[in-house]
Image (tube, grey):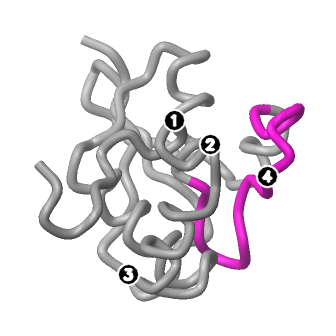
Amino acid sequence: MNPILYVTHDLKWYEFALELPDGNLTTVEFDELEAYAAGLGVSPYVDHVPNPIVVGRMCDARGWDIDPISHELMIGRWVLEALGGAGFLEEAYASASGFREMYPQARRRGEP
């Protein structure tokens, strides 16, 4: 079993919770994301919101899993707080050439 990364059920996040295979919990500071943002041209976090792409890179490199609910919460907060809201999705989908590669789960309204 791999360690599992979580965010807490709080209004603001300042660190992650990591459940180790033995059941113990430890914390992971947002500062650790900085090494995994290198070369991407993106911020690893904005205020109290981690960049979900950078979190994924960190977890892949360290052999950790991301709790699926925590991942959804990170994506939602990133879109709403760091990228400027739901309108960003429509605008970015239409204009950014790399958007679909970065967010393959994103679809336009009415698209399968």
Nearer the viewer's eye, disc 2 or disc 3? 2
Which residue was labeled with disc 2?
98
Q: Element at badge 4? A: loop
First in sequence: mark 4 vs mark 2: 4
Label 1 near label 3: C-beta < 8 Å? no
Q: Earlier in the sequence, mark 3 or mark 1?
A: 3
Q: Residue 39, position in %: x, y?
A: 88, 32
Secondary element type, mark 2: loop
The mark found on residue 28 in the picture is: none
Pointer 1 local density, CA inside 10 Å: few below 14, some 14–19, many at least 20:
few
SS under mark 1: helix
User: Quick one: label 3 or label 4, which is nearer the N terminus?
Assistant: 3
Tell me the crowding category of disc 3: few under 14, some 14 to 19, or many 20 or more residues within 10 angstroms, Cα based: few
- Establish if 49 lies above or below 58: below
Label 3 belongs to which residue? 10
Residue 43 picture quarter: bottom right
In magenta stretch: residue 11: no
What stretch of residues is rendered in magenta?
36-51
**Gap between marks 4 and 2, in whole Å?**
13 Å
Disc 4 crowd rating (10 Å Cα; few below 14, some 14-19, many 20+) is few
Q: Which of the two residues, 73 or 63, is positioned nearer the viewer here?
A: 73
Q: Earlier in the sequence, mark 2 or mark 3?
A: 3
- Work out whether mark 1 precedes mark 4 in sequence or the reverse, and give the earlier one: 4
Residue 76 found in image quarter: bottom left
Q: Which residue is mark 4?
A: 42
Residue at which label 1 appears: 101
Q: Nearer the viewer, mark 3 or mark 4?
A: 4
Check if mark 1's residue and mark 2's residue have beta carbons within 8 Å: yes
As drawn, 80 above or below 96: below
